[in-house]
Image (spheres, grey):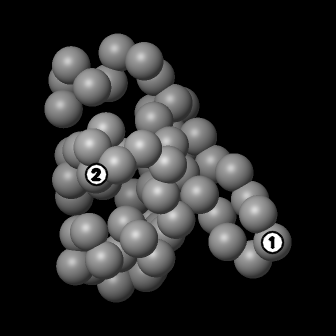
Amino acid sequence: MRLRLLNALRIHGELSVQALMDETDQRQANVSKHLGILARDGLVRRRREGVNVYYSLGDASLPGVC
């Protein structure tokens, strides 16, 4: 699941939680749980805009891993 999220961010750039749910066909709780782990480890960055949270890759070397 985490690799799927990272790959979606690699392909599309910054995405909202809703867009990541659509890309992975997963529920919000599951997506948010995995994004939280990825953010904690510095692999993704968060940006809040109003009620929406947007995620992007947090490490420039990640596209090669994905």
Residue in view at x 46 percent, y 76 percent = 18
Residue 41 picture location, percent across and down: 50, 34
Amino acid, disc 1: Gly
Residue in view at x 45 percent, y 65 percent = 33
Q: Relative to 22, say whether 2 is above or below.
A: above
Amino acid, disc 2: Ala
Residue 43 picture location, percent across and down: 45, 33
Residue 5 picture location, percent across and down: 30, 53
- Disc 1: which residue: 50
Judging depth in this view, the residue of 49 and 3 nearest the camera is 49
- Spatial CA distance of label 2 from label 1 is 23 Å
Residue 34 picture location, percent across and down: 39, 58
Judging depth in this view, the residue of 12 and 40 nearest the camera is 12
- Tell me the crowding category of disc 1: few under 14, some 14 to 19, or many 20 or more residues within 10 angstroms, Cα based: few
SS for tag 1?
loop
Q: Is residue 41 left or right of residue 45?
A: left
SS for tag 2?
helix
Occupied quadrant, residue 61 = top left
Residue in view at x 37 percent, y 66 percent = 20
Give the numbered dot on residue 33.
none
Q: Is residue 47 left or right of residue 3?
A: right
Give the mark nearest the N terminus, 2 or 1: 2
- Disc 2: which residue: 8
Q: Relative to 19, say whether 60 is above or below.
A: above
Judging depth in this view, the residue of 58 and 36 nearest the camera is 58
Q: State if disc 1 and disc 2 touch (CB < 8 Å).
A: no
